[in-house]
Image (cartoon, rainbow, N blue to C red):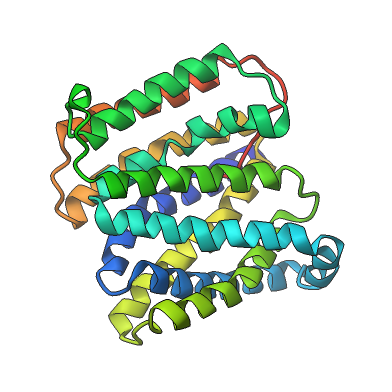
Amino acid sequence: MKTSNLAYVYGMGAVLCWSTVATAFKLALAHFTPLQLVLVAVCTSIIALAVILGVQGKLKLLKGQFRKRPLFYLQTGLLNPFLYYLVLFEAYSLLPAQQALSLNYTWAILLPLLAVPLLKQKLQGSDILAAITGYVGVLVIATGGNPLSMNFENPQGVALALASTLLWSLYWIINTRDKGDPVVSLMLSFIISLPFILVTVLTTDKLPSLNLEALAAGVYVGLFEMGITFVLWLMALKKAERAANISTLAFLTPLLSMCLIALVLKETITASTIAGMGLILSALVMQKLLKPRGPKVEPAA
C-alpha cells in the first residue's frame, strides 16, 4: 500500500475510534463518577502505551526524556489527562452527549486565540471571524436555540465543557515546546498524573467498581479516547504527504458521533444542536480556508 494511502487508513481508523467516545463517555459515566472514570481510563492508557512503546523499542527512552525536563512533564500531566478529563467527564455527566460533544469541539477555535499572547503569534482576521461564528454556535446550543434570551439550560455543564477547551488548548500550546518523541511524552504525562489522580480519588471519592460491565466501559474509554487512537493519528500525520489533507478527516468525527449518540443513547438530536454544531464546523472551515500560510500550532487531534 502507498504511504499516502496508508496515512488515510490510519487517519480514518482514528476518526472512527474518536467518533465512538462521546457515546462511550455517557455509558461509562452510568457506572463511574467522573473522577473514577479518569482513574480507570488513565490506567488502561498507560498499559496500552507501554505495549506500543515496547513493540516500537522505545521504552528505554522514558527515563532519559523525563530527566531532561521533569517539570515540563509535571505540567503536561496535570493538564492532560488529570484536569482536562476530569472537567470533560464532569461536563458529560451534566449535559446531553450531543451538547457536551459540540461545546468541546470549540477548542480548535480557542487554540489560535490563545497562541497570540502565549506563543506571540499574530491574530488573523480569520481567527476573529471564526471565533465569533463558533461562539454564536455555542450560544445557540447552550440556550436551546434561543441565544438572545441568554437563558442557559445548564450553565454549570456549559461552563465545564468550555473550561475543558481551555485546558486542552493550553496543553497543546505547552506541547509546542516538547522536542521529544510524542508517544513517549504522552506516556510520561499519564504516568506522572496517576499518583495525583489516585490520591484525589482516595481522599474525595472511592475506588471504582470492579463490575465487569463498568470496567469494560472504562477500559474502552482509555483505549480509544486516550491511548491507541492518539498513536493512530500520529502515524497518519507522519505518513501523510500533506498533514492538512489528513486533518480534514477530523471534521467527520462530530457527524459520526451524532449518529451514534442518536442510535445508541437514543438522544433526539435537537435542531439547536444541529444549528450550533453547523456554526462551529463552519468556523473551523473558515480557519482552514482563510488563514494565510505560515507557522501555526498543529495539535494531534
Expressed as whole percent of the image width and height from the top left, the position of residue 301 reads 54, 44
- Image point 14% across, 53% down: which residue? 266
Q: Name the residue rendered at 80%, 49% in the picture.
A: 179
Image-quadrant location for residue 2: top right
Res. 90 image quadrant: bottom left
Q: Is 148 located above or below residue 171 in the figure? A: above
Q: Residue furthest bottom?
A: 210
**Left or right: where 277 falls relative to 148:** right
Q: Residue at x 59, y 33 (%)?
A: 114
The spot of residue 205 in percent (x, y) is 38, 79
- The answer to whether residue 188 is seen in the rendering is yes
Q: How many marks?
A: 0
Q: Is residue 99 above or below residue 197?
A: above
Identity of the residue drawn at 64% across and 50% down: 235
- Point out the image quarter for the N terminus: top right
From this viewpoint, is residue 257 visible? Answer: no
Residue 177 picture location, percent across and down: 76, 45
Question: Image check: 254 left or right of 124?
Answer: left
Query: In the rendered image of this protein, does residue 64 appear above or below residue 261?
Result: below
Question: Which percent across, then down, holds residue 193?
Answer: 60, 69
Q: Answer left or right for 124 relative to 184.
A: left
